[in-house]
Image (spheres, rainbow, N blue to C red):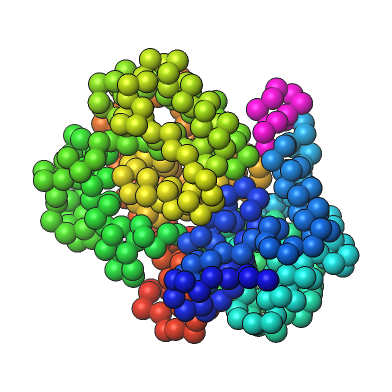
Amino acid sequence: MKMHSHKQGPVGAWVVDVNMGYGHSRAAHALKDLSGGNVLSANDYVGIPELDKKLWKESRELYEAVSRLKPVPVVGDMLFDAFDRWQQIAPFYPRRDLSKPNFQLTQIYRMIKKGLGKHLIAKLAENPLPLVTTFFIPAFCADYYDYPGDIWCVTTDADISRAWAPLDPQRSRIKYFASNGRVVERLKLYGVRDENIFLTGFPLPKELIGGPSSRVLKDLLSHRLCNLDPQGIFTDVHAKSLRAELGTARCVIDKTSHPLTLTYSVGGAGAQRQLGVKLLNSLKNKIAQGKIRVNLVAGLRKDTAKFYRDAVVAAGLKKHLGTWINVPEFDSRDAYFSGFNELLKTTDILWTKPSELSFYTGLGIAVVMAPPIGSQEEFNRTWLQYVGGGISQNDPTYTDEWLFDWIDSGGVARMAWNGFIQAPTHGTYRIEDIVLGRTSELRKLPLIV
């Protein structure tokens, strides 16, 4: 069975995700250099046994169905709340022992004892490189079936439920890359040993950073701040800090690098697609006047992409499709993640639910948050507000008013800057250094974020 491609350089680890939603795959895509450019999906690989396929499929379909039902009045809320309680994150305070397994965790181990993941781990064990997974179940399987190599698990939210830690955390070999300080502390409450927790930050795409010096990121942020601070209010107040971090102010020569650009992104389940149409209709005059460019990103969902193209035509903006409005389509998950990263190079504002994309404020991108879907997204929203990189949306019907008020006041530029300064940026590099046993030249992250 061919499980890996070596076409893009040396392989230092197996990188494993699950293709449920985008969060776990997005993190794995950023880490793909560790595995020669290839990511293996635990729930969808060549030769996966029928039993595994069936168990994974059921869990994914349940999640996506419930996520799509969320906007349905009354019934959607009831179903989603029941599902969310099943995977809920307990309040952090007061600090206490939270190591007792929850129902979700016992169900996961019941499936593992039935054989879930046994085939995958046996195949990987033939070449026992470090195993880096962005979802907890493959890590549990590796631990349970005694995988001979190191087992690393990358957390993908700003806080995590008990299901992320194994049944017996004290005896487990699983080591964690924590996305922020709260996750570090949370894992300790779940009983994970201190020496198995590494604070790295969420893995962000290297092509948007440009190495430990953040060369590419600083260039992109300079362009972005020009668009986000047309009155110069933010840049006047923070001129000294901006010069120290980014070099001489470049707004005059950079003014034409790209127009003010908003990217609206829906999740893997396609929930909240209607919101994209509301903001499109609100901004249609500004789009027609060349004052803002809008990307409506439907991920891999062809139905949502068509829905957006139809909405563009209905709004009388067909002639701007492909210039001032983009509705990109992608044929594979890999193409989607690469294409999305390319879009972010010229994105000034990212509008999305507070998913794993909340961490992308670390790239110096201001985030406008759609309503959260699920317990973990509530925590992501709190974290994003806490670091100052994002804010909850106002009424989307009046986006053309409030968004431009925020921009004209320098407030959106401030969010982009806060994200760059406060949120972890170099998670991918930290993870690579630890897995490959290299000495890191990056500073140690403060526990608070």
Answer whether residue 265 is visible to the viewer in this image.
no
Span shown in magenta: 67-77
Indicate yes or no whether the magenta region holds residue 72: yes
Q: Seen from this angle, which residue lies furthest front? A: 1
Return the x and y of residue 260 as percentages of the image width and height.
Answer: 28, 35
Please give left or right for residue 66 compared with residue 39 in the image.
Answer: right
Identify which residue is drawn at 35% across, 57% down.
208
Q: Nearer the viewer, residue 266 or 444?
A: 266
Compared to residue 71, the image places residue 128 above or below, namely below
Answer whether residue 49 is visible to the viewer in this image.
yes
Q: Seen from this angle, which residue lies furthest left? A: 252
Return the x and y of residue 268 as percentages of the image width and height.
Answer: 59, 43
Identify which residue is drawn at 57% across, 64% down.
39
Picture quarter with the N terminus: bottom right
Return the x and y of residue 253 as percentages of the image width and height.
Answer: 11, 46
Please give left or right for residue 221 compared with residue 394 in the image.
Answer: left
Compared to residue 423, the image places residue 253 above or below, namely above
Indicate yes or no whether the magenta region holds residue 56: no
Please give left or right for residue 411 compared with residue 19 in the image.
Answer: left
Compared to residue 68, the image places residue 26 above or below, namely below
Return the x and y of residue 103 as percentages of the image width and height.
Answer: 84, 55
Q: Nearer the viewer, residue 151 or 328?
A: 328
Compared to residue 118, the image places residue 247 above or below, namely above
Please give left or right for residue 73 compared with residue 317 in the image.
Answer: right
Image quadrant where residue 8 sits: bottom left
Identify which residue is drawn at 77% across, 70% down.
119
Identify which residue is drawn at 71% across, 75% down.
123
